[in-house]
Amino acid sequence: MNEYFPYLISSTIEYNIQIRPGKERDCETLARFNVAMAHETEGKKLRHDVVASGVRQMLRHPERGFYIVAEADSSLIGSLMVTAEWSDWRNGFFWWIQSVYIDPGHRRKGIFRSLYGHVKTMAEERDDICGFRLYVEQENRAAQATYASLGMQETSYRMYEETVL
């Protein structure tokens, strides 16, 4: 699978991004992205050390899920995390896309589209993935428009949670 995707940023500037699996060396940047995303989307202030520990756990335990990152000029510019949910109705896994973050200087340039496309390609190589899901803040209209443009549809489900940590 080719992991390099060229993207036209404007009519005069072209650069390459590499889409690849997240690695342990990416931990600090992924944690920084997650802290920034929580603050931007929900106004939450997360502790970097706690988030970094959580990211490290995911990277060390692939049975929990995985990260996909976008890299340009040896710097991470975007990422997402994938976890799996078994569907007995479909006899397959939904891949949940979570912790999506694109560096502000690279937004609206197709980076998420590249990450999502890579995840879809990965799923096509397997026979046990039945779909993709994600959740988005109700007020985040820009993200909703992006997801819809990629063929995702809003569901009729509402999400409930109870936290214990």
Image (spheres, rainbow, N blue to C red):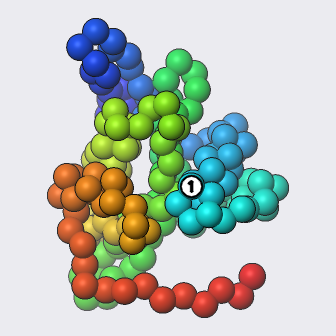
Instruction: Work out whether residue 121 or residue 26 is closer to the camera in this orientation and state it.
Output: 26
**Furthest-top residue in view?**
12
Left or right of 27 in this view: 79: left
**Amino acid at the residue labelled 1:** Glu
Residue at point 48%, 66% (across, down): 83
**Mark 1 surroundings: few (<14), some (14-19) or many (≥20) residues within 10 A:** few
Image: 20 above or below 14: below
Residue 151 visible to the viewer? yes
Q: Residue 93: percent from the left, percent from the top?
A: 35, 73
Q: Quadrant of the C terminus?
A: bottom right
To which quarter of the image does residue 55 belong?
bottom right
Residue 34 visible to the viewer? no
Q: Quadrant of the N terminus?
A: top left
Residue at point 71%, 88% (across, down): 164
Instruction: Work out whether residue 109 or residue 2 is closer to the camera in this orientation and state it.
Output: 109
Instruction: Work out whether residue 77 or residue 24 is closer to the camera in this orientation and state it.
Output: 77
Residue assigned mark 1:
40
Residue at point 66%, 54% (across, down): 35
SS assignment at label 1:
helix
Image: 109 above or below 160: above
Q: Residue 57: percent from the left, percent from the top?
A: 70, 60
